[in-house]
Image (tube, rainbow, N blue to C red):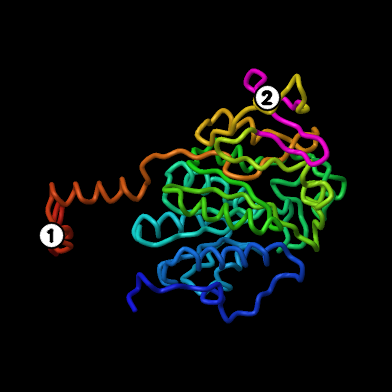
């Protein structure tokens, strides 16, 4: 049997390590979908590299039967960047959380996104620091009472989608831990994109921030509060009533679908439209607006590792093969 005909199952990507997350944690669902997607990609296990920082989500490399690296707080983007630049043949997946990725690691993540390496960033957003026992995080809502904000947070929360778009990410996606089929599809979309894919995943921490997204994801309300965006389809949602988004200057306005506002008048989703992506990212459930999930934005440009390898090739053509001895004896040298 040749390598091209080898098929894999989810079990092939399950490690022998005991999973040490709290029972009921949303990370279990995400892990299951990642293992399923890895099997579907048909890539040998040794061609995957999973890089993480610090946090509950960052235990991911232990639970996947692939190569991996559990790095230090906020520095996963630097390690993932170096690995992909020097080993562009690998499928590199970076795992981070809202604290690890947007607080101490925010500057590193911004530069990874603007460089456009061909790798996938999965940011688990539970709006809390779970590993260190429930302090508020960069995405915690205003007024959030935690161990470190007993009177309520006065910080304005980070918007991960706007952060990614502002940093120049070429593929920006959102999904939810409990939307198993949708999450699986979004991971496949991210993998198919050539460039940096940023996937924000709403994830429940049932110990320190339980139910953070119930107002969006509970079965009885999700159809009226979640907007599934799909390329070429109008931005409409709703179970009992049908709602849509129409253009209002540089913003989006909610209308009820009726004779005066037919579905055909609603904005059609175009993932290549940066302005539309920014408007979708600004939608706020606290204002009664829908929460978009799906591929929010996608565009194409050359990847960092392609440009990097092109420079190496050009340098070799101009200067010849590398010679360490010649390098050490070049320039200002002397003998004692």
320 left or right of 152 in image: left
* In the image, farthest residue toward the front: 259
Residue at image coords 77%, 41%:
225
Q: Position of residue 33 (x, y in %)?
A: 60, 63
Residue 326, label in figure: 1
Question: Does label 2 or label 1 sit earlier along the sequence?
Answer: 2
Residue at image coords 46%, 41%:
114
For the N terminus, the image quarter is bottom left
| Vertical arrangement, residue 134 with respect to residue 256, above or below | below
Callout in the foreground (2, 1): 2
3 left or right of 143 in image: left
Q: Position of residue 169 (x, y in %)?
A: 50, 41
* Badge 2 density bin: few <14, some 14–19, many ≥20, Cα 10 Å: many
Q: Which residues are the magenta region? A: 235-255
77 left or right of 315 in image: right
| Vertical arrangement, residue 277 with respect to residue 46, above or below | above
- Residue at disc 2, secondary structure: strand
Between residues 299 and 206, which one lies in front from this camera angle? 299
* In the image, farthest residue toward the right: 151
Residue at image coords 72%, 54%:
126
Which residue matches tag 2? Answer: 246
* Badge 1 density bin: few <14, some 14–19, many ≥20, Cα 10 Å: few
Question: Is residue 241 on the magenta stretch?
Answer: yes
For the C terminus, the image quarter is bottom left
> Marks 2 and 1, Cα distance to the nearest angstrom?
66 Å
Between residues 6 and 331, which one lies in front from this camera angle? 6
């Amino acid at each position: 049997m040749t390598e091209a005909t080898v098929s894999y199952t989810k079990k092939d990507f399950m490690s022998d390590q005991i999973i040490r997350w709290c029972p009921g944690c949303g990370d279990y669902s995400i892990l299951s979908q990642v293992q399923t997607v890895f099997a579907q990609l048909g890539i040998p296990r040794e061609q995957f590299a999973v890089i993480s920082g610090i946090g509950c989500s960052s235990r991911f490399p232990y639970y996947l039967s692939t190569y991996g690296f559990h790095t230090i707080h906020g520095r996963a983007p630097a390690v993932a960047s170096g690995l992909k630049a020097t080993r562009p043949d690998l499928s590199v997946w970076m795992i981070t959380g809202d604290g690890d990725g947007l607080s101490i690691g925010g500057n590193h993540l911004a530069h990874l996104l603007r460089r456009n390496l061909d790798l996938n960033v999965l940011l688990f957003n539970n709006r809390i620091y779970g590993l260190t026992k429930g302090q508020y995080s960069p995405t915690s809502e205003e007024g959030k009472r935690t161990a470190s904000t007993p009177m309520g947070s006065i910080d304005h929360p980070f918007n991960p989608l706007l952060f990614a778009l502002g940093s120049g990410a070429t593929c920006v996606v959102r999904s939810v831990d409990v939307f198993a089929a949708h999450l699986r599809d979004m991971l496949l979309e991210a993998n198919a994109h050539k460039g940096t894919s940023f996937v924000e995943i709403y994830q429940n921490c049932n110990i320190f921030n339980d139910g953070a997204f119930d107002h969006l994801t509970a079965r009885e309300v999700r159809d009226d509060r979640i907007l599934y965006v799909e390329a070429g389809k109008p931005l409409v949602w709703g179970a009992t009533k049908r709602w849509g988004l129409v253009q209002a200057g540089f913003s989006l306005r909610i209308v009820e679908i009726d004779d005066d506002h037919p579905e055909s008048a609603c904005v059609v989703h175009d993932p290549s439209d940066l302005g539309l992506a920014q408007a979708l990212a600004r939608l706020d459930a606290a204002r009664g607006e829908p929460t978009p999930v799906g591929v929010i934005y996608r565009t194409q440009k050359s990847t960092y590792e392609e440009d990097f390898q092109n420079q190496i090739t050009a340098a070799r053509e101009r200067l010849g093969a590398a010679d360490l001895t010649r390098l050490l004896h070049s320039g200002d040298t002397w003998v004692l």
